[in-house]
Amino acid sequence: MGRAAILALAMLAAPAAAQEHGALLAGACQGCHGAAGGGSQGIPAIAGTRRRAEFAAILRDFRENKREATVMGRIARGFSEKDIAALAAHYAARD
Amino acid sequence: MTIQRRAFLAATGLLATPRLARAQQAGRLVILGGGFGGASAARFARDHHPRLDVTLVERGARFTTCPYGNLVLAGRRDVESITFGYEGLAARGVRVVRQSVAAVDAGRKRLRLADGAELPYDRLIMSPGIDLRWGAVEGYDEAAAARMPHGWIPALQQVTVLRRQMEAMPEGGVFVMTIPDNPFRCPPGPYERICMVAEYLKRAKPRAKLIALDAKNGFSKQPLFQDAWRELYPGIVEWRGASEDGRVVRVRPAAMEVETEFGDKVKGDVVNVIPPQMAARVARDAGLADESGWCPVKPETMESARAPDIHVIGDACIAAPMPKSGFAASSHAKHAVACAAASLAGREPPAATYFNTCYSHVGPDYGISIVGVYRGTPQRMEEVPGSGGISPRTAALGERAAEHRRLEALYADGWYESITREMFGIA
């Protein structure tokens, strides 16, 4: 077994709670933005499109009604700071 | 699991090595029901918990969604475009068993299938959907439903039955719809249906009327729907709530007549009865429902409050204030899978956050929505204060109104495409 596979097994054995939190929250995003976060029918792509800080800032702007929205303001007002950080880690492009 | 990590695992070959995966199996997850809850659970389990052995038990070969059924009624979609198979999930490693479930043996942790086979599980996720309460409206039984269609459970009766009756309706005819009290599947559904029927009538039979008789006084997205009826369908839609004697207690299919609580008789050329509902029989027979006919669950894990190692999700469970919607079922599903996996691994369950986003089409390029974010605590399911709510009313949107409505109609289509592609493993 190669080193990469051993590393992968280690990752499987110890899934980080934060990572799981992000994946679960992202489960809701997927409902509209697609399983891979690629968007659909005017719904924008969210996966790998922004750096982490920028992604979090957009969600905060939605939450604080500083960014024009249809549903995202109403959704983002349900997110805590921890939720926003987890989603940014899940979806953002690598910094 | 993040996308990057999944890609990494795929690259190392771990996801594509069934023998290795089986050797390290983390447990047998069996999912009953292949609708929004069950199919979403199967997909999420395959994507995020590759060591789980995932079996989906569903009696139908293909599934027609309830969402977008109203667009079939309007003539905007055909039923084929809202019907899906399970090949995509099977290709992703879900074992799909096409069988009815005869019984759930919670004590021995097995399902008994209609063909006599037994299916053992370590964790069971039940997403069985609903049954109609035949006879709850006097005279409304399965025979009556042929003349007075419900079109509410596609596996029982496709909405196309109602569509054909509507097409055959005379000029200047009357379409009667009866709507039940809460709780029921898809709280905005009857009101979206009013819009889609009215859209068809306005185009094809402009002198026809729609009379909606409702067992309650308030309903989902009410101000938005009522604004739309006034804006788009003046003179076509009449809605009567309970305080205006709108509660229908009796139907006479031979006379195409319904009767209200206080004895008003209303005749229709088409009569669409949306009857009261309850959790599907397989869940009730397993003792998972309470006296209300619905299944109580623990809000922090979606586990049954009545039997161990079983999660009940979707329309069958009691998750109020969450609505009985496809989006909510999919949200329950993902959390239930995570909790099942955590339990099998001896870990604490993750914190419970659930979501709902429900769009309704009310006219061409005119969509509206309701959103909710919820936390499941040991005591209750609660909406996050300050979050959620319905689209702004037209007056509040001012000159942005048309664009807002157009975008929500577009996003509704995007939501439908995204969630169905995800849950059926298409993409």
Image (tube, coloured by chain):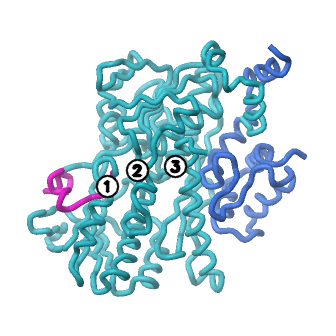
* Chain for colour cyan: B
Mark linked to residue B87: none
Q: Earlier in the sequence, mark 1 or mark 2?
A: 2
B262 shown above or below B138: below
Could you tell whether B290 is left or right of A51 in the image?
A: left
Q: Which residue is mark 3?
A: B328
Camera-side residue of B106 and B254: B254
Tell me which residue sits at (43%, 64%) in the image.
Answer: B77
Residue B33, x across and y down, in percent: 42, 37
Q: Which residue is mark 1?
A: B158
Give yes or no for residue B281 being in the magenta stretch.
no
Tell me which residue sits at (42%, 68%) in the image.
Answer: B192
Mark 3 or 1: the one toward you: 1
User: Marks 1 and 2: CB-CB under 8 Å?
Assistant: yes
Magenta range is: B135-153
Q: Secondary structure at mark 2?
A: strand
